[in-house]
Amino acid sequence: VVACWAARLALGDRVTFEGVHRAMTVDDLTVDVQNRVVAMIGVCWSLEAMQDFVPQCEWVFVVETYDSVALELEHVVYPTCVLVVDPAMCAASMAWNFFLPSEPVPALVRALEDAELGRSALGRSAEFARGYAAVLDLVPLFGAIVPGDQILSRLELLLDGGGRATRERCIEKGLALEAEERA
């Protein structure tokens, strides 16, 4: 969802988003991809599904975090399919860098990345990791996400000022959850 928000900041309301999962195919989409530029961020389909999908699109950009996806997609040989893989970053950070290369990645997105990758590189990482799911409630979305969708407005509020206040709320919640577990 954060990746969609980054794309929306860069491209405005002229883009269409659709939440997908790995088991889907082009036949499951509710949006038209025929002759469109498509970015698949943080999820990629099987080799067979991609071979059906890519020829329908004008361009496909796959932004992924798993080396195994890169190995699988070596066999998708289309000049209009660009694969960007970095296992040291989360999909949201990669999307931010892809769509907004001159803007620093917000602190909240870096904290999510730190938690997702289990790095504990940032201060109070463990507390943040323990509390962010309860505070953010960002469940994966499937289907079309249209301009004006409530989740995009909610992300804008969560990421206000780089999301520092939201990060602190997540840390506080993590500390509270830890105290509850000890009690």
Image (cartoon, helix red, strand yellow):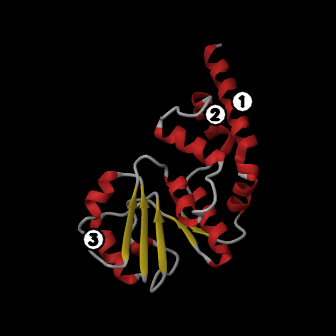
Residue pictured at 58% horizontal, 34% vertical: 122
Query: x, y (%) of residue 159?
Result: 71, 51
Instruction: Tell me if 35 is positioned left or right of 16 in this view.
Output: left
For the residues bearing labels 2 and 1, Cβ distance under 8 angstroms: yes
Task: Answer whether residue 1 is visible to the viewer in this image.
Answer: no
First-in-chain label (2 vs 1): 2
Query: x, y (%) of residue 64?
Result: 42, 57
What residue does disc 2 label?
131
Displayed quadrant of residue 14 = bottom right
Displayed quadrant of residue 21 = bottom left
**In terms of secondary structure, where does tag 3 sit?**
loop
For the residues bearing labels 3 and 1, Cβ distance under 8 angstroms: no
What residue does disc 3 label?
76
Which numbered mark, 2 or 3, is in the foreground of this view? 3
Q: CA distance from mark 3 to mark 1?
A: 45 Å
Vertical relation: 107 (above or below) 169 = below
| Extreme residue toward the top, this view | 183
Residue pictured at 76% horizontal, 50% vertical: 161
**Callout 2: few (<14), some (14-19), or many (20+) C-alpha neighbours within 10 Å?**
many
Q: CA distance from mark 2 to mark 3?
A: 39 Å
Residue pictured at 42% horizontal, 79% vertical: 59
**In terms of secondary structure, where does tag 1 sit?**
helix
Nearest to the observer: residue 113 or residue 183: 113
Query: x, y (%) of residue 85?
Result: 39, 57
First-in-chain label (3 vs 1): 3
What residue does disc 1 label?
172
Task: Answer whether residue 64 is visible to the viewer in this image.
Answer: yes
In the rendered structure, which amino acid carries the disc numbered 1? Glu
Vertical relation: 77 (above or below) 113 = below
Quarter in which the N terminus is drawn: bottom right
In the rendered structure, which amino acid carries the disc numbered 2? Gly
